[in-house]
Image: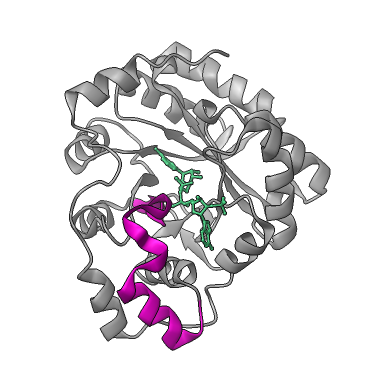
Amino acid sequence: METVTLNNGVEMPVLGFGVYQIPPAETERAVADALAAGYRSLDTAAAYGNEEAVGRAIRSSGIPREDLFVTTKLWISDAGEEKAARAFETSLRKLGLDHLDLYLIHQPYGDVYGSWRAMERLQHEGRVRAIGVSNFHGDRLVDLMDHNEITPAVNQVETHPFHQRTADQELMRERGVQIESWGPFAEGRNGLFTHPVLTRIAAAHDKSVAQVVLRWLVQRGVVVIPKSVRAERMAENLDVFGFRLTDDQMEAIAALDTGRSLFFDHRDPEMVSRLGNFVLNV
Ligand code: NAP
C-alpha cells in the first residue's frame, strides 16, 4: 500500500476503509471482510456508533497492531479540554486499543480550541500518533494552526468529482496539512457511477467508475477511505494502483467540479445548530 508522510513524520496509507452508515450489527463482518481484502487503515467516529464492532473485528483478525492505522473522531458534544480527554478514553476503550493512529475533531463547532489542547497533550503523551480535523474550511484551519502548537496532520473534507476542493488542497499543501476525502463517490449522488465522462474513462482502462474516481483522487495526492459493505466492491476499491490516468483524463474529470457541497454547507447556520444539538449517548 502506498503511504503519505504526515507533517510529523507518521506514515498513513493513502487508501483506507470508511465505516460511516454501516449499522453496528453489520460492522464487525464488514471490517473483517475489509481486513481480509487487504485494507489496513480504518476510519470510524464516536458518532458512527460502531467503534466497538470495529474493535472486535480488529482483535479477531489477528493482524499485528503496528500494521494497522486506526482513525476515530471526537463529536461536538464532547468538545472542550476535559470532555475531549474523556471522550478519547471512551473511544479507545470501545475500540479495545491502547493508542490511536489518528484522532480528528469531527466538526469545526463547539470548543475546538479546548479539544485541540487535549489532543495536543494526548499526542505528547504518545496516546495518539497524529491529530487532525475534519470539515474545517480554510479560515478555521488557519486560525486553529496559527494559535496552537501542533499543526493538524490531516483535514478530512468532502472531496469527489463534483466537489473537488483544489483551492482547499493547495492551502493545505502550503500549510503542511494532508487532505483526506470523505464521500469519494459522493455516496453515489449526481449519478456518479453512471456519469458519461467517468464511464468513458473507466472503459478506456477496463476499470470501473469507482476505480477511476479513487485513482483520480490518489493521483492528486488525496487520501481516500471509500465505504462498501460488499466484499467484491472492497476488493475492487483497493485495486487502483496498477494504472494511471492521463493528463487529458485528469482534466476531463477536473471539468466536472461544481465547487459546491452535495451534502450540506458547513457554514449554514441551520446546519451548525442542528449538528451542534446532536448529543452522543455514551
Ligand atoms: P462513499 O464512500 O462516497 O460512498 C459509499 C457508497 O458507494 C455506498 O452506497 C456503497 O454501497 C457505494 N459503493 C462503494 N463502492 C462501490 C463500487 N465499487 N461500486 C458501486 N458502488 C459502490 O461514502 P461515505 O461512506 O459517506 O464516505 C466514505 C467514508 O468517509 C465514510 O465511510 C466515513 O468513514 C468518512 N466520512 C466522513 C465524514 C466526516 O464528516 N468526516 C462524512 C462522511 C463520510 P455498498 O456499501 O452497498 O457497496
- Percent across and percent down for residue 193 are 42, 64
| Figure check: 88 above or below 227 | above
Residue 127, compared with residue 272, is above or below; it is below
Q: Nearer the viewer, residue 103 or 108?
A: 108
Is residue 47 at least partly visible in the picture? yes
> Is residue 180 inside the magenta stretch?
yes
Question: Mostly what secondary structure, the magenta segment?
Answer: helix
Rendered image quadrant of residue 150: top left
Which quadrant holds the N terminus? bottom right
Residue 35 lies, with reference to residue 203, above or below; the image says above
For the point 44% across and 49% down, which residue is it?
Answer: 8
Residue 195 or residue 237, whichever sits in front: 195
Left or right: residue 183 versus residue 260 is: right
Which residues are drawn in magenta? 178-207
Residue 37 % position (x, y): 70, 61
Image quarter of the C terminus: top right
- Residue 128 placed where, x, y %? 55, 36
Query: Which residue lies at the image location 56% right of the left edge and 42% below the top edge?
Result: 19
